[in-house]
Amino acid sequence: MPIGLILTGGSAKANVALAKRAEQAGIDAVFSVEFFNQHGYVVLGAIAQETRRLRIGTGIANSFTRSPVLHASAALDLDELSDGRMVLGIGSGTKRMNEEWYGVPFSRPAARTRELVRLLRALFSQRGFGFRFDGEFWKLRIPAYAFPEAAAIALARAVRYGEWRSRPVGEPARPEGLRRDEAAAIVATALPRSDGWLTPEETGQLLACYGLSFVGQRVVPDPTGAGSAAEELGGTVALKALVPGIVHKTELGAVRVGIPCPERARAIAAIDSPSSA
């Protein structure tokens, strides 16, 4: 049968020391008490850090002298600190304790305790922000966002989305002159190949089937050809190495953009690779 111990050391430090001795002696659980000069939760945080096996719990925490959210957050924090060893015990206390010691009203303790247990269970099962509870004694409205700035950003995005949804749908674009059969033939030619990739020429032909223009390009074998191609194309050019089997050439530094003149293109091609485009 599991054995538990009520902590009556007389002070917070004494109760921590008592809990450590209880664990060494093989006791299964220790429980704090709450009085006008003793806090039911605080001492358990220290005990959680000083023990490894003991179950810890409140025996009991006063039900009505703190809000349900404070009960729940304290119990959850202690459960985390103890790696799941926390046991929450609550009790109403007496009318005199509530009214004369803590200055809180005391009425219908049984009904309030039933609702408190239901509320705490709902809080324990909550994930993330945002919580609502409508009871006879407690009505809670916890926002879904921890800070008003985050809520304002979310609201602005919702407004923009609503504006976008309210725009006229219109007619989808229907470009004329599409050459679907020709495009299908280009793809069918490339599929049987081992790599399955379109050549630059095939890519240009495929885009042209759908009315899309292709940036001027040249495939050259060496740096001299790169310079000549840059001079022929005119303006700012880009260089990209043709390396079989490598798709994402940018990550390997095999793509250079913003090259302003043929001489620069020739020099970069000579540095990077003997076969650049």
Image (cartoon, grey):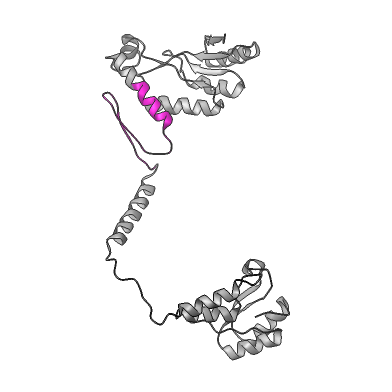
Location of residue 250 by image quarter:
bottom right
Note whether 131 is above or below 95 in the view shown. Answer: below
State which quarter of the image contains the N terminus. Answer: top right
Magenta span includes 94: no
Give the residue at x 30% y 56%. Answer: 159
Quadrant of the rendered image containing residue 4: top right
Q: What residue is rendered at 71% in x and 80% in y? A: 275
Residue 62 in view in this figure: yes
Q: Is residue 207 above or below residue 111?
A: below
Query: Residue 33: x, y in percent?
Result: 47, 13
Residue 67 appears left or right of 261: left
Percent of width and height locating residue 139: 29, 29
Is 58 rendered above or below residue 158?
A: above
Magenta residue span:
116-145
Where residue 231 sits in the image (x, y, percent)? 61, 90
Residue depicted at 31% across the width and 10% down the height: 95
143 or 208: nearer the viewer = 208
Give the residue at x 33% y 53%: 158
* Viewer-nearest residue: 222 or 81: 222
Q: Does residue 9 appear in the picture of this structure? A: no
Question: Which x, y percent locates residue 268?
Answer: 68, 79
Q: Quadrant of the C terminus?
A: bottom right
State left or right for residue 227 relative to residue 128.
right
> In which quarter of the view is residue 254 placed?
bottom right
Number of numbered discs visible in the structure rendering? 0
